[in-house]
Image: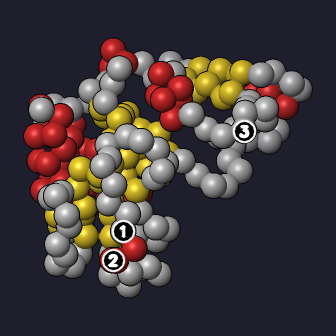
């Protein structure tokens, strides 16, 4: 299975911003990343009025929309009580990936990098550094117990760390 690496932080810390910077840096290092992004909002990748939207809304449990450049599979999951990260990851094409980056899922038991920015609504003392945390990336000087502390404003440093972590 492709290794998972989660990025966990409170809302407003900059998870998406950092991942947008990290993905090209990882590719430069020869790492082929995939991404699973968790959202608490109701989301839809299709547009009302489009044929695929109307066919899916007619009751199809799964709908695949394809073109020469990309394809998307939408799966309806109203009966599932909670998301299963490993099941979701197993749906990705492992042959084209070296790593699956995960935004969110902070309570999953997978390796993760905690992100912290001073001024976000929580204090640094509230960081939950458990056995799955492999590093903390932040914008202040902290002493994290038993894990490296990275500069959240240095995507290159974080990409280097991830590259070294993957090689282990």
Q: Nearer the viewer, residue 122 or 143?
A: 143
**Secondary structure beneath label 3:** loop
Callout count: 3
Q: Is residue 53 visible?
A: no
Give x and y (percent) for residue 19: 34, 52
Per the image, the residue denoted by label 3 is 81
Marked residue nearer the N-terminal end (1 or 3): 3
Give x and y (percent) for residue 62: 72, 21
Per the image, the residue denoted by label 2 is 124
Residue drawn at x 61%, y 38% is: 83
**Secondary structure beneath label 1:** loop
Taking 26 as reference, is 14 left or right? Answer: right
The C terminus is located in which quarter?
Answer: top left
Residue drawn at x 66%, y 29% is: 74
Q: Can residue 34 be seen in this view?
A: yes
- Pointer 2 and pointer 1: residues touching (CB < 8 Å)? yes
């Amino acid at each position: 299975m492709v290794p998972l690496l989660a990025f966990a932080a409170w809302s407003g810390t900059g998870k998406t911003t950092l991942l947008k910077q990290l993905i090209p840096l990882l590719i430069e290092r020869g790492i082929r990343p995939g991404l699973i992004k968790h959202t608490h909002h109701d989301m839809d990748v299709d547009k009302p009025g489009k044929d695929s939207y109307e066919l899916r809304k007619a009751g199809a449990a799964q709908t695949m929309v394809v073109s020469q450049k990309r394809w998307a599979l939408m799966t309806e999951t109203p009966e599932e009580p909670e998301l299963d990260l490993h099941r979701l990851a197993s749906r990705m094409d492992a042959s084209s990936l070296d790593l699956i980056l995960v935004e969110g899922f902070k309570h999953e038991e997978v390796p993760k990098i905690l992100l912290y920015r001073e001024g976000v609504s929580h204090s640094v003392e509230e960081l939950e550094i458990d056995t799955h945390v492999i590093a903390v990336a932040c914008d202040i000087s902290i002493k994290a117990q038993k894990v490296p502390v990275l500069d959240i404003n240095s995507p290159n440093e974080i990409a280097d760390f991830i590259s070294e972590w993957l090689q282990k």
